[in-house]
Amino acid sequence: MGAQLRVYKRRIRSVTATKKITKAMEMIAASRIVKAQRKVTASSPYATELTRAVTAVATGSNTKHPLTTESEKPTRAAVLLLTSDRGLAGAFNSNAIKAAEQLTERLEREGKEVDIYIVGRRGIAHYNFRERKISDSWTGFTDEPTYADAKEIAAPLIEAIEKDTAEGGVDELHIAFTEFVSMMTQVATDDRMLPLSLDEAAKEQGTEGEILPLFEFEPSAEDVLDALLPRYVESRIYNALLQSAASKHAATRRAMKSATDNAGELINTLSRLANAARQAEITQEISEIVGGSSALADATAGSEN
């Protein structure tokens, strides 16, 4: 019985140490959510106005440009998947990967060849384990992404969209990431970044039916779109990185809170079992003492007779 009690005490100490770790991780994630949410809020107006500017330029000119012109027969597409470098975030990574795979399947059914670009070690590990080709990947900044990271990611994607498909280029650029809706709600989604659909962009920006200003372009509308193309892609990727980071921290906080609560319940259960084992041990010791005392009394009475 004493050995069983020692086992319970050892498990209680182990779970208590784990609870301290998960509680600390929960508090760290909670503090990071606020910072990430502020960055998302700060980056949104820039992305909104940039999309509005692109829409105005494209609407006010008849220039054919990779930013806004859809291919008649698209045959190749690029998909950028945003995951995290670390786990312990519940279903955060698996949901993002699932969204990317569903998007890939949909594009392949449309007869398009898909190139996969991945941010985050979790997504890379998933595709490497299944021996699936990755065109390019990036790691090391998913918790706190910067605009420089977005520029680094955007460079090969812009190069691919500007190339002809015969030279390894793509006709479309999609992104799969986790959208931060609120502290309790994060949704894995996908979006087409290029070519930019002017109608969809107007709906997103709330300018549908609005009369956009007319511009005169110098030297040309095409040059303006050439200048806006990298800024547009970079801003969209940066905003998605920030939303993904905020979503990951929220998922981590939720997962660590659940782990902390479960650890507390397990400690209570083990404590009850340890108390029961201690009581059983005490009862057994009392029984042995009483039995020994009775035997001694019987032996003494026999010797007197």
Image (tube, helix red, strand yellow):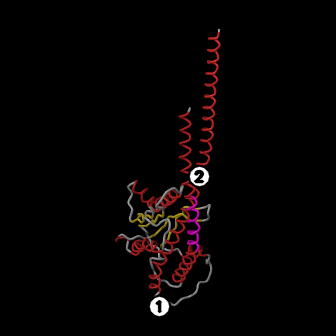
Where residue 107 sits: x, y (%)?
46, 62
State yes or no: residue 98 in magenta. no
Q: Is residue 215 above or below residue 143?
A: below
Where residue 221 sits: x, y (%)?
47, 86
Q: To which residue does mark 1 refer?
A: 218
Q: Which mark is residue 260?
A: 2
Residue depicted at x 59% and y 73%: 41
Is 279 positioned to the left or the right of 248 in the image? right
The local secondary structure at tag 1 comes to: loop
**Amino acid type shown at disc 2:** Thr
Is 254 positioned to the left or the right of 104 in the image? right
Considering every residue shown, the one lying at the far left of the view is 167
Residue depicted at x 54% and y 63%: 178
Q: Is residue 155 above or below residue 302?
A: below
Considering every residue shown, the one lying at the far front of the view is 304
**Amino acid type shown at disc 1:** Glu
Q: Nearer the viewer, residue 17 or 111?
A: 17
Q: Which residues are magenta?
A: 26-41
Q: Is most of the magenta stretch helix, strand or loop?
A: helix
The residues tagged by marks 1 and 2 sit, at their Cα atoms, a distance apart of 61 Å
Mark 2 surroundings: few (<14), some (14-19) or many (≥20) residues within 10 A: many
Q: Nearer the viewer, residue 32 or 135?
A: 32
The local secondary structure at tag 2 comes to: helix
